[in-house]
Each structure stands twice: as structure tokens, then as C-alpha cells.
Amino acid sequence: MVNTLFLPELREMLAEHNEPELIEFCTALHPARTAEFVEGLTAEEAWKVIQFAQPALRAEIFNYFELDRQIDILIHEDEKLVASLLVHLASDDVVDLLQELPENRAEDLLALMPSQARRDIRRLQNFPEGTAGSVMTTEAACLDERLTVREALEALSREAESLETVYYIYVVDDTNHLRGVVSTRKLVSSIARQDKHLSDLMETDLVIVHALDSQEEAVQKVARYNLLAIPVLDDRGHMLGIITHDDVIDVVREVATEDAQRIAAVQPLRDGYLRMNLLTLSYKRLIWLTILFFAELITAFVLTYYDADFKEYIWLVWFIPLIISSGGNSGSQSATLIITALATEDVALRDWAKIIRRELACGIVLGSLLAMIGLGCALLMAPGPREASVIPLTIILVVICGTLSGSTLPLIFKRIGWDPALMSNPFVAGIIDILGIVIYMTMAKFVL
Amino acid sequence: MVNTLFLPELREMLAEHNEPELIEFCTALHPARTAEFVEGLTAEEAWKVIQFAQPALRAEIFNYFELDRQIDILIHEDEKLVASLLVHLASDDVVDLLQELPENRAEDLLALMPSQARRDIRRLQNFPEGTAGSVMTTEAACLDERLTVREALEALSREAESLETVYYIYVVDDTNHLRGVVSTRKLVSSIARQDKHLSDLMETDLVIVHALDSQEEAVQKVARYNLLAIPVLDDRGHMLGIITHDDVIDVVREVATEDAQRIAAVQPLRDGYLRMNLLTLSYKRLIWLTILFFAELITAFVLTYYDADFKEYIWLVWFIPLIISSGGNSGSQSATLIITALATEDVALRDWAKIIRRELACGIVLGSLLAMIGLGCALLMAPGPREASVIPLTIILVVICGTLSGSTLPLIFKRIGWDPALMSNPFVAGIIDILGIVIYMTMAKFVL
């Protein structure tokens, strides 16, 4: 919902170049709300409005603009103003934004930035997508281990505005090796002992990630150790940057969404659903659909084999979708439960025997109950009670097959080092469809 | 993996009551690592080890124990020691733990806690599960608006040890109404102006939640406004507590996992997969399986209607699973994409027309490509080219039906205020199965 409350007033203020009121507008609200209020303006107008905020605040408000608007501004507004805005954004966000610009525009903007910032960004650009290095920011509070509490507080107070987080102080030596961490909490509670050195206060048992570790690993550590930020080091222990709590929340969401998409047999989108090119979207879905289609083709070949039986007992056809979907649904449930439990570290590979026992038991319970309903219907529809018994017997077996394959396949994938979420539900369902038909017809031949 | 590295040494230290070394062990490592190292000990031994840590640190280490171990300790160890441990835990965690204990034990422990802490916990216990109030903690840094920067820093330094987060200072008036927020970052960068009052520094455009709002709402706000913690108020604006970043990460994960489970037609587990009672697990799966089973029963009734056609053209049977699963799979993809996009606020209800256009286009592209493969096989298997044409024509229509119903049903659910994830993939698949069979047989009658 675009907030149109202030639009006429804002346009009037802009037309009159009403500086005091525009400054007031930019500073009175939470930057996210300011961004909401200018949503109804054009990108050009919104950009004009936020020129009345101080550079740091301007960058904060800009941060809350929608991606399309941000790109629009970066492409079309004055190079110098834009470059000075970029200096105030977190370096990881700058990297993401530059990636969306035409290459020469990105180069022009980079050329206008101070050399230190430019170097940082070039370095970040080199980390492959999905690594810890690609989501880190270089704006961390790194202080010398020889500083006292008082000096550290003073240094922080000078830098606080430009740092993304001041909640941890990273203590480094002369060659930028990370030696320890002091939380601001610890620093604040040590105010009474102003002459202590950072090296006396710092924790030296560090939780860190390496720049080439996966972003999932960074997130797992942040969640496990309840951190606000995690430092990122290179191979030789040099401090490169930090991954902050807001990026962690984004990554948690992204990973969970990607898992859900894989479970439903879509290649993860990465970009937003609506932003994505229609052909790319189709392509990401087509790969799996085609694989699944070929899997289901096998059912067609299997069925040709039973032509004679179907001709004799045409009522067997009626139950085909019911039987294969019972197996498919219980298999999807098992696969999803195990995949999500593995992703949240709720179960581990070493629990495999326990998992299989549970799923077997669940399959028997669920299969028996569904079989009872199935028996009721089969008695009404099949020619006689002996014929009807085929249906419940098949259902029990198919449901057990479903829970067992739905639970073991993700475990096997995990074991051989693949993403268990690749063992998508439709894939499990495809396997169950084939098995289901074989079980069904074997059972029918046996009973009839 | 249980870390067995230090176990013999730890047992020896305990036997010898080697105080200096046990204190060293408790303090040298990150509390989470200390907890890992004692994982191989019994709960009783681990409890003995952490008695050598200061109360605040002891509570931190305890926090990283596994839930079963925590409960074991709370039930079996000395009441007074346990109660004094609880005082140092975050109040929301205490509420969660007490819930797992036998009622009289929980009451005994509560009775031993200081009256203020007991009142806080009783109040938290009254908030229904899933509300913001149920995940908040009462340990927030609330300071009087009349304090100066210097006084605030001193007050913080006294309380910092016992507070869950000192990254925001909540500024309250005499009646505990929330008036503003000062970030520690702001406070630290104002050290040079020590005589300013908190009321001069505070932000007054507040982002808050009410205690009875849903925890999802709290999380959305924290993510949208990039917060480290969000204050929780009652109806009259009194400060009740805060929800902190670590709880937010937990809730984000929980919500994403629950969505994935609903998408696969399992009622959200809440408890861990392995901790859950087998009957409860079966029950949570059975409800949906039964509903889906009845949906699939409709396919059986629909199929009885086409007996004569199947007798004449038995080869039509071969393609039943292929056709219904093509529709089901493309429908699952659409449903998952839309459900996850809605959950991450990547699309909104107002985008409905755009979504349906995209899904229609996707359905046509995907359906046509699968139809071409289908045509190839049908030409090989069906009696003649005219007969074979039934298969690709059906596939196109069924896939389009799949993408359209997979995308519109979650949108409709969202519109009427239900959880879109309830529109689970198997449910979409069930609808497509019925539609698919009707389309298939209508097409067959039309062509043949």
C-alpha cells in the first residue's frame, strides 16, 4: 500500500524549496517510515527530498527504498552525489547494487569513490556468490589491543556514525590479525576501570568464519552462539570484515525459502518472483518438470504390461490415482519433515536408525487407518469382498513405501554430500508412483 | 558428535575437586564451547562442573546445554541452586523451561525465586503461545528520560551484566510509559556531550509491537526496520519487555519450517521431530492425509463414469499417472513459489493480476514443452497418430490448470485471511487430479 498522506505537501515543499520543513521531514521519522512516505513520489523527487538529510541519514533512508527505485537513482542521478551516497552504505550492499547497474556506470561510480572504499568493494566483488565473504561488510570496529577502555570509547564515539555495528569491538594487532573480541556490553560495564587495556578485557576463544566458507555455515554459527555479528577472516587470520545480524536474518529466510522451493522441485529463484524474467522462471521450473515427466513415463510403460488384467477387471483402473497419491502424499510428508529437521539441525545423520524406525511405525499406523477407509469404499465399488481386499492391502504397503523412501532418500543424499532438499517431494512421489503401480498389480494378481 | 577430548581430565578434576583448573576450564572458552566439551559427561557431572563458574557465566553455559539435559538438571538437582540459576536466565527462557517440568517442581522452584522475578514469569506465562508476549524477555535496559549521558552510562555499566541486551536503551517516564529509544551507538557517539539528557538524544518515532500481536508480526518488523530488538507494550503503552535478535532468528526459522511443513500437508510439529511422541506425530500427519484421501476418492468415482471408454481404448489407462502428475507437479511449483513469495513479502495481494498473467504464460510454455515430449511417446505407444494427439493436448491443458490453481488458491486463502500455506501442495495436487481426469476423458471423447 503506497502511503499518499504527505505527497501533496512534499511536492509543494519541493516546489518552494522549503528547506527547514524538508529537513524536519527527513529527520523526524524512523528512516524506514520516511522511505515509506516518499514511495508515492517519482524516484527523482524522492532523491531530491533526501538531499535534505545528512549524508549518513540519507544513506539509511535510501537503504529502505525498493530495489528498483535504488537502481533507478543510481543510474540516472548526478554521478558525484550518487558516489558520495555509496560511501555511506554498507560495502556488501554497494556490491549488490553495483551488480545491477550497466557495467560502465558501475565503473564510473567506483572511480569517484575514495580509494580505500573502492579497494574494499573490489575485494568483496571477488568472493563467489553464496560464500561468507560475499555477504560481509568491511565496516567493523577494529581497534588496537593496546588501547585503554577510555581510549576505546573515544575512538568508538568518533567512528560510531560510519560503522555498521558497534556492538562488538574486534581487537587486532599491528598486522590486522584478529586477537580477540570485546562486546560493547563488557566495555560499558568496565567504565569504572578506565585504564584497563582492551587486551585485558577481550575474549580470546573466537567464533569466526573464513571468507570462502558458505553463508549457511556463517548463519549456523551466529544462531548457535547467539551472536550479533561474526567476524570473517582470510586463510592467515587477517580480519576482513563482519557479517551482521540483519544480513543473517536475510540469509536465514533465503535459505529456508530456497529449501522450500527445492522441496517443490523448483530451482531456487535467487531474484524475487516478480522481478524475474519469465523465460528464466520457466527454465528453472522446466528442468525438474522434465525429469519428473520422464520418471512418470515409466509408469506408462509399466501399465502397458498389465493390459490383460485391466481388460478383465476394469474396476482396478478406478483406484489408480487414489493409490499412487496416498503413497505420494505420505512420502512428501516424510521427506519434508526430514529435510526441514536436517536443515534446522533438529536431527543428524547419526539418528538414521531411529528415523527409519519412526517412519516405519508411522507408515504402519497411517497406512492401516487409510486402508480402513479404502476398504469401506472398495466394498461399495468392487464386485465382491475378495476383490475389494486388494485395495486396503495395497494402500498399507504403498503408504509404508512412501514414508520409508521419503525419509531415507534425503538421508542418503545428505550422506553422499548432496543437498537433501534436492530429494524433492515430486521426485519421491514419482518413485512411489512406479512402485505403487507394481505393488497394486502384483497384489491384484495374487488375490484375484 | 560428542566431543570426548577433555572427558577423562574433567572427571579427574571433579574427583580431585581441583578448583583452580575447573574455574579455568569454565572461563577460558566461549560458553557454547564449554557446553560442548561437557556434553559427554552425565547431566549431574556437567552441573557439578559449571558450579565453578560465576552465576552469570554459569547461566550462559547452561543456556547452551541440550533441552533434555536442562530439564534433567532442573528436575533432579538441588532446588536452591537451580532457582538461583533461573534468576540469571532470560525470563522467556525460564517460562519455556518451567513448562517442561512437573507442575509441583515448577511451583517449588518459582517459590524460591525473588518476588520480582516470580511476578515477571507469572505475567509471561499468561501470554498465549505464538504471541509477541510469549517470546519476549523482561530484562531490558529501561532508564529515566531525565538521566544525562554520563548517568545513563553509569547506570548501564551497573546493570549490563544482568541485562539480555544493552544495545538499545528504552527511555521511560515515571509511569513506565515508553517515551523513546536511544541506541548504544548514539550514546557512545555522544560521550563528548556528557551533560545532554536522554530525552534530547532519543528517537521518538518508535517501532513497537503489542503483547498480543503475533510473533510473526514482531519478526516482520524487526527484519523490515533492521532492529536488534523490538519493545513490547501493553494496550496503554506501558513497557513490558523486548524481543531480542536471537529469538527473532529462532522465530524466522520456526515460521519458515512450519510453512514448509504446511506446504507438504503436515500440521506444524512445534516440538522437534525426534522429541515428539509417535502418536502425536501420526496424528498431525493423519488429518491432512485423510482429507486428501477423500479428495482422491472423488477421482475413483469420476473414473467409474468412463468404464466403457477404457474398455474400448485400454491404452488410455497407461497415461493416467503421467497426466495427473504433470498437472500436480506444475501446480506444486506454482503454489510453493507463491506461498514463499507471500511469506517473504516478495509479492503482495495487490499483485494478483500480474501473478496470474505470469502463471498463465508459464503454464503455456511448460505445458507445450512437456506436450512435445508426451507426443513423441504417445506416437510410439498409441494405436495411431489421431489417437496419440489426445495426450499432448491434455498435457497442455492440465499443466495450465496446475499453474493457475496452484497460484490462485494461495492468493484466495490470503485474501480471506487464512494462512496461504494451508493451501498445501498435495491439496492442489488433489484438485488437479480430479480436473486432470475430467480433461483427459473429455479430450479423448472429443478426439476419438
Image (cartoon, coloured by chain):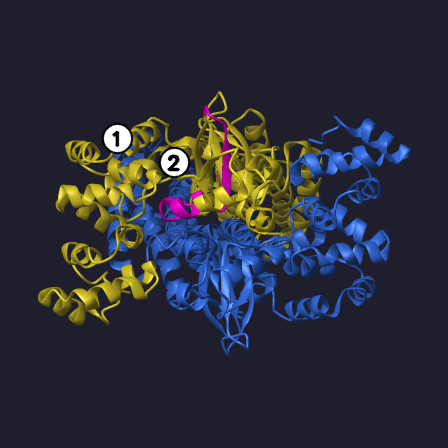
Chain colours: A yellow, B blue
Q: Nearer the viewer, residue B207 or B352?
A: B207
Pointer 2 or 1: first along the chain: 1
Q: Which residue is mark 1?
A: A115
Percent across and percent down for residue B242 are 54, 62
Q: SS of the residue at dot 1?
A: helix
Chain of the residue under label 1: A
Q: Which residue is mark 2?
A: A138
Q: SS of the residue at dot 2?
A: loop
Residue B201 figure quarter = bottom left
Q: Nearer the viewer, residue B33 or B3?
A: B33
Percent across and percent down for residue B11 are 85, 32
Residue A166, magenta (yes or no): yes
Residue A76, magenta (yes or no): no
- Given this view, does label 2 or label 1 mark the residue nearer the observer? 1
Residue stretch rendered in magenta on the structure = A155-175
Query: Are callouts 2 and 1 both on one chain?
Result: yes
Residue B40 figure quarter = top right
Identify the image quadrant of the N terminus of chain A.
bottom left
What's the CA distance linking mark 2 and mark 1? Answer: 14 Å
Percent across and percent down for residue B298 are 48, 57
Q: Are marks 2 and 1 in contact (CB under 8 Å)?
A: no
Q: Nearer the viewer, residue B192 or B91?
A: B192
